Amino acid sequence: MTYAQIWQPLVEELACLQRAGSKAEFWLRDDDAVDPTPALDRLLDLTGEFAVPVTLAVIPALTDEKLVVRLHEAPHATVAIHGWAHRNHAPEGHKKQELGAHRPREAVLDDLARGLSHVTGLHGARAVPMLVPPWNRIDAGFVSDLVSAGFEALSVYGPPKQASLAVINSNVDIMDWHGTRRCRDHGLLVQDIIAQLQHAFDGGEPVGLLTHHLVHDESAWLFLERLFAVTARNEACVWLPIKTLIGRGAGKGK
Ligand SMILES: [Zn+2]
């Protein structure tokens, strides 16, 4: 399939939304930032070029001033709290979790409070009090404690569950984690985006694109560039800053 054939269904869907007077809403979450790297430069340059706001889920225990300085040149970047150290506490053979029920409650809540205060202390107003649990997993028993720990929003992956704070989930992951560990097929990603747009049109959540700049292959970068080319200057689309979504309390009470 050619580039045009792969993207035509999305182009048509957007034209359809425009005729209906509707707007396609997108937001971008990129995980695992710690330090300035060439891959982070590439992400910030690409999103900057298309004026796409990006929310970086930063690993608190591993990051410092170097990232703060780099982001001074990236006004379109916001930072969120990616757990504490991205350390797995689940036993061998279980799904990886830093924020599971494997440790005493106080230890997990201490990690979360420390993560929030470290990232907010470093990044100031650029930081949003949103928790992005490593591996998109958090024990359900901790979610009700997030507000008292200072968080206003939670972001995992998939359909949002009811919670006492805003739940702003990602729902289209560009990487094939369980197979090739490269970018997924572009045609299938376009289909997933269209399905999510139709769900959003029926009162569902915006398209929450999930990326991991440190492991992108060339196909992943190409996908992002083409997606931005189709959407970022299209009147039927808007790429929302995370603060707008937190302000709406997206997903809360569903
Ligand atoms: Zn991660």
Image (tube, rainbow, N blue to C red):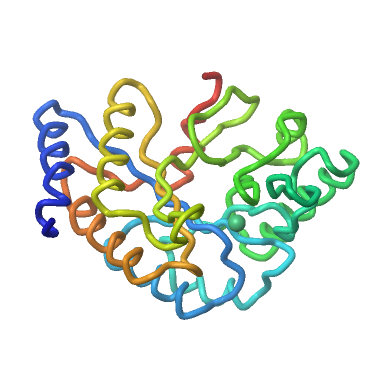
Classify residue 115 as left or right of residue 109. Answer: left
x and y, in percent, of residue 197 in the image: 28, 34
Depth check: 135 or 41 in front?
A: 135
Above/below status of 211 relative to 67: above
Residue 48 shows in this picture? no
Classify residue 29 as left or right of residue 128. Answer: left
Above/below status of 24 relative to 44: above
Depth check: 101 or 236 in front?
A: 101
Residue at screen point 13% across, 26% down: 20
Residue 38 shows in this picture? yes
x and y, in percent, of residue 246 in the image: 51, 38
Depth check: 140 or 147 in front?
A: 140
x and y, in percent, of residue 44 in the image: 41, 69
Residue at screen point 44% across, 60% down: 180
Above/below status of 106 relative to 164: below
- Which quadrant does the N terminus fall into? bottom left
Classify residue 67 as left or right of residue 74. Answer: right
Classify residue 5 as left or right of residue 161. Answer: left
Q: Quadrant of ligand 1?
A: bottom right
Residue at screen point 23% across, 53% down: 232
Residue at screen point 48% across, 61% down: 212
Above/below status of 216 relative to 188: below
Residue 94 image-quadrant placement = top right
x and y, in percent, of residue 170 in the image: 47, 42
Tally the numbered discs.
Answer: 0
